Image (cartoon, grey):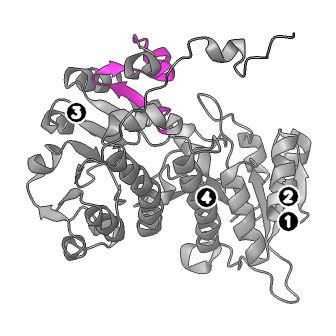
Amino acid sequence: MSKSLSPFTKAQLLPQEETLEILKQKGELFIGIPKETHFQEKRVCLTPDAVSALTANGHRVMVESDAGKGANFKDKDYSEAGAEVTKDTAKVFSCPILLKVEPPSLDEIKLINPQTILISALQLKTQHKNYFKALAEKRITALAFEFIKDEDGAYPAVRSLSEIAGTASVLVASELLSNVNGGNGLMLGNISGVPPTEIVILGAGTVGEFAARSAIGLGANVKVFDNSITKLRCLQSNLNTTIYTSTMQPKNVLKALKRCDVAIGAVRGKNRSPIVVTKTMVDHMKPGAVVIDVSIDMGGCFETSEVTTHDHPTFEYNGVIHYCVPNIPARYSRSASVSISNIFTPYLLEIGENGGIENTLRFDKGLRNGLYFYHGILTNKSVADWFGLDFSDANLLIF
């Protein structure tokens, strides 16, 4: 008589590992929004609508008086949205969570309480060692919003601000071409019977794509140069139209620059933007032509570029008008503030739902990518390499 088969396999009878569920308990956040003091910075991290969404979810928001003034948001708007508005700067900096557009200055770090969570830009290229030492002394947990990734692995804050910079570069060029601003009196549009304006864009990234999109929308004749064929192919696909594209061969670039009315530099480098347009090339450009160097925050891709400000945005070199303001999105502070606010708000609500930053960093890899300080310990390898500092892997600290 044959033996009956057991309904259980050998694997099922072996001891199995048990996974324990980590309890997520909703927490109440207390967020401080200080007024930006950085030179010509007019943006604000949260709009009144965003504050309203946060307070409706049971969170507290404290806003320094006139924090939204540069973006045309009134204290009354924040107050009606449920925020606590105060003129006491130290009181705002004492909040457990701080939101800033620009990284805090050393004087502002002195006002921050130990163990505070700081979310702001880092702007690695403009920082210094003392900034990181000051954060370490206060045992601060800091996140840089330009390093935060979304579900697709993209950088939402960088892309959003690049979209603004790209679109703004064409709008600025349009202003500078007019007679009112000392330009050639050209209109950046396609008028019947009038030859279209010629625009050269160097770089086919997000800035280049949105500059091209805006220029094409106005009816300009656009030429885009980039050494990445993949980027040029993506740009053509995203624009859904066929435009002139080329790799950055000096001969082709020079030929295009000689004929163009506007040249937009949007080339990024690892540590510094490569110079793709020499002084000799600029010498061959038409008098009254406009150069918008969006890459100026990383040194600029035109050899003739020099950093300018929003108060004095342009200078002339050999009859060619140069616009080299590093922080172009601040020129459109309200739109830029809404854009930044749209990125911050879902993350803040997520942190609240998960019961704080600790749990959120465990579950959200994209947010963890933005972490560069954890309770006073440096966790970002790029920062450590740049300044010669010691760092620890965030994954080893959090789990």
Kind of residue at badge 4? Glu
Mark closer to the observer (3, 2): 2
Mark 3 or mark 4, earlier in chain: 3
Front-lying residue, 276 or 55 = 55
> Quadrant location of the C terminus?
top left
Mark 2 or mark 4, earlier in chain: 4
Mark closer to the observer (2, 4): 2
Q: In the rendered view, does 344 fall on the left or right side of 1?
A: left
SS at circle 3: helix
Residue under label 1, please give it. Answer: 240
Residue under label 3, please give it. Answer: 106
Instruction: Identify the residue shown where x is 32% and y is 50%.
Output: 39
Front-lying residue, 261 or 274 = 274
Mark 2–mark 1 contact, CB under 8 Å?
yes
Q: Is residue 380 visible?
A: yes
**Mark seen at residue 210:** none
Mark 3–mark 2 contact, CB under 8 Å?
no
SS at circle 2: helix
Query: With respect to residue 126, does 16 lie above or below?
Result: above
Kind of residue at badge 1? Asn
Mark 1–mark 4 contact, CB under 8 Å?
no
Report the Cα–Cα distance between label 2 and label 4: 17 Å
Mark 1 or mark 4, earlier in chain: 4
**Mark seen at residue 163:** 4
Mark 3–mark 4 contact, CB under 8 Å?
no
Instruction: Identify the residue shown where x is 67% and y is 48%.
Output: 266
Mark 3 or mark 1, earlier in chain: 3
Residue under label 2, please give it. Answer: 237
State the image quarter where residue 227 is shown. Answer: top right
Q: Position of residue 65 (x, y in %)?
A: 16, 63
SS at circle 4: helix
